[in-house]
Amino acid sequence: MTRKLTASIVAVLMVGLLAFDLAASEPPDIYAQPPLLALGSGSVASGAHCAALPTR
């Protein structure tokens, strides 16, 4: 195989993967995001290493 053929195959596969992903998923709702600062609201941070409490 030549480099041009290999690059073309990879490009077609990437475009196909992108098209499948866009067709299978719904766009994110930008208004349903958690607040940037939730001081005193009762919301707790979760899902990230910076939200983990120290163990010692």
Image (cartoon, helix red, strand yellow):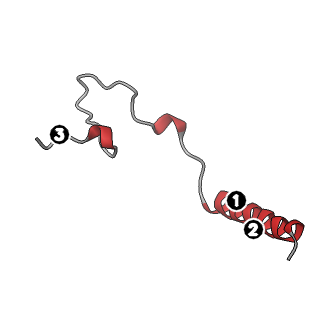
Tell me the element at label 1. Answer: helix
Which dot, 3 or 2, sits closer to the camera? Answer: 3
Tell me the element at label 3. Answer: loop
Q: Are marks 3 and 1 in contact (CB under 8 Å)?
A: no
Q: Nearer the viewer, residue 18 or 56?
A: 56
Residue 14 x/y as whole percent? 73, 62
Residue 28 x/y as whole percent? 55, 45
Of mark 3 and mark 1, the one earlier in the sequence is: 1
Quarter that holds the N terminus: bottom right
Binning the other alpha carbons within 10 Å of mark 2 as few (below 14), some (14 to 19) or many (20 upward) gives few
Q: Nearer the viewer, residue 9 or 25?
A: 9
Read off the residue under disc 3: 54
Residue at image position (27%, 34%) is 43
Q: CA distance from mark 3 to mark 2?
A: 44 Å
Read off the residue under disc 1: 18
Binning the other alpha carbons within 10 Å of mark 3 as few (below 14), some (14 to 19) or many (20 upward) gives few
Res. 22 image quadrant: bottom right
